Amino acid sequence: MKFCNIILRRNNIAFLFLFFFAFSVRAQVSTSSPYSRYGIGDLQFGGFSKNLGMGGMGFALSQPFTINFNNPATYSSIALTTFEAAGTGSMYEQHNATSQHAFQYNGDFGYLAMGFPLISKKWGLSFGLLPYSSVGYGIADKQINKVSGDVQYHTYEGSGGLNQFYIGSGFSLGKNFYAGVNASFLFGTINQLRKVEYPSNSYYNTKLTDQTIINNFYFKAGLLKTFDSLAIAKSDSIILFDKRIAAYEDSITVLHKLISALNELKSTDSITVQIQRESLAKSVSDLNEQIMQADAAREQVTRRKQKSGWSLSIGLTGSPSQSLKAKHTQLAQSYYYSNGIEYIRDTVYNIEEEKGKLVLPLSLGLGFTFKESSHWIAGADFSVQNWQEYSLFGVKDSLANSWRASGGFQWTPNDRSIKSYFSLVQYRFGGHFEQTYLQLKNSQLVDYGLSMGFGFPMKRVATTIQIAFEAGKRGTIANNLVELNYVKCTIGFTLNDRWFIKQKFD
């Protein structure tokens, strides 16, 4: 036992070290998508590995030993101090109408979070670090100047993105009704570079360097309502009915003995004996009626208990349209090459740390989960975002309102199995379909994919290895656009411990 405690303490120390290290490197997930050029880049799904394995659903997913960032109201169900961390890897295949293909591979930090109960089953707290958006692209385009007829090479490059450090709390509002809020500090830098170059020195080349820095708070709230059939059928109700029926039957046995004794009397025809016999017979009849009623009630409770592991949860999340502080730096220069070395000829203009606003849109999400004890969970989510409200320094972009639908399933054969380890494993499947916020060349791009995941519990320590795979497609080759096929893998762990919980026994 002491050895296990030492192991857990070492895991806790290692986790805290990893947390502060991740904060120092600012938790940026890489991407390789030409579509990350627009807006604030590719939006990173805010769920953890468990959510990813089920298609991303999680607005109504509440469990005691995991953290669900998607709905802060679920923090109220955290039973033990819980740590979540993961790394991600991805592969992108880009191709267009001319059958040109390009492959990119990326790997980086995924997320890091901690949650713990403040009041058991009533109030919980969580905080963590994860990406919000990622920018990563490199595009080269050859064009002909319509006026001079000269060849121009256009280059577009981008990197960076936004991260979020959040702290949130979930608390009970009443019986099986919870609310919560996340306060996230969004921070990060988006770097963009645009070049126009000529193959000869007849013209000067030009380049525009653009840097946007964002640091501000962002809020998200959630509600959760659970309809739990365990409240209908208490665990000891059948035993109470059995005891009541047994008491009635004992009373009937005693009454029958009294009736038999009266029948053996010589004066059985006397009025007094007849009145007593009729009274005892009526008592027996009343008791039989009560036994029948108790049997019917017992049968009803039995049927309810067969369904007592089922529960339905409905979750609602939302964040209002919010204006975030931003700083903007732009540098435009003309230059030329000599012996392969770049020389700056002139600075066209230079804007340093211009202050402005980034307007993020209203977003709403609705989800439900249907759960049967610890054996399986099924659920679905639907969310919308009003990206027509978006602007950066008062400038709109090629964005449209978006929506996303996702659904998933988790199955655990037997979470108490001793003989078969694979009966303990959590198996997850899911999928999603999204109409993204990108509207290019009169086409609003879609993103869809399938996912699967596993939760591998580690024996002797309260840790689960979480793995999720996702394969999908974004974009189209129509209208000279690019189609992206992608495969993503997230590998992490969930660790539970008893920090901040008072021991009841020494």
Image (cartoon, grey):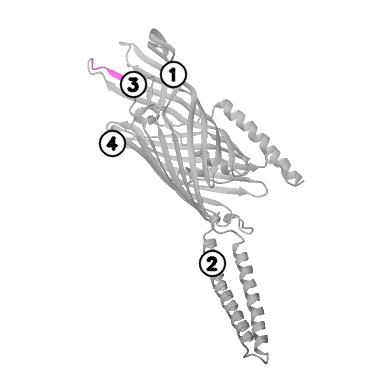
| Residue matched to label 2 | 297
User: 112 or 102, which is in the foreground?
Assistant: 112
- Upstream in sequence: badge 3 or badge 4: 3
Badge 1: how crowded within 10 Å, few (<14), some, or many (20+)?
some
Q: Is residue 224 left or right of residue 480?
A: right
In the figure, 289 relative to 504: above or below? below
The amino acid at mark 1 is: Gln
Q: Can residue 252 be seen in this view?
A: yes
Alpha carbons under labels 3 and 2: distance apart: 79 Å
Q: What element carries label 1?
A: strand
Question: For mark 4, what is the residue?
Answer: 478
Q: Which amino acid does label 4 sit on?
A: Ala
Under mark 2, the amino acid is Ala
Please identify the quarter of the rendering in which residue 291 is found. Answer: bottom right
User: How many angstroms separate mark 2 from mark 1 (CA)?
Assistant: 72 Å
Q: Nearer the viewer, mark 1 or mark 3?
A: 1
Question: Label 3 neighbourhood size at 10 Å, few (<14), some (14-19), many (20+)?
Answer: some
**Label placed on residue 323:** none
Secondary structure beneath dot 3 equals: strand
Mark nearer the N terminus (4 vs 1): 1
**Residue beneath disc 3:** 154
Nearer the camera: disc 3 or disc 2: 2
Asked whether the beta carbons under mark 4 and mark 1 sit within 8 Å of each other, the answer is no
Q: Residues within 10 Å of mark 2 (few under 14, many from 20)?
A: some
Magenta segment? 148-152
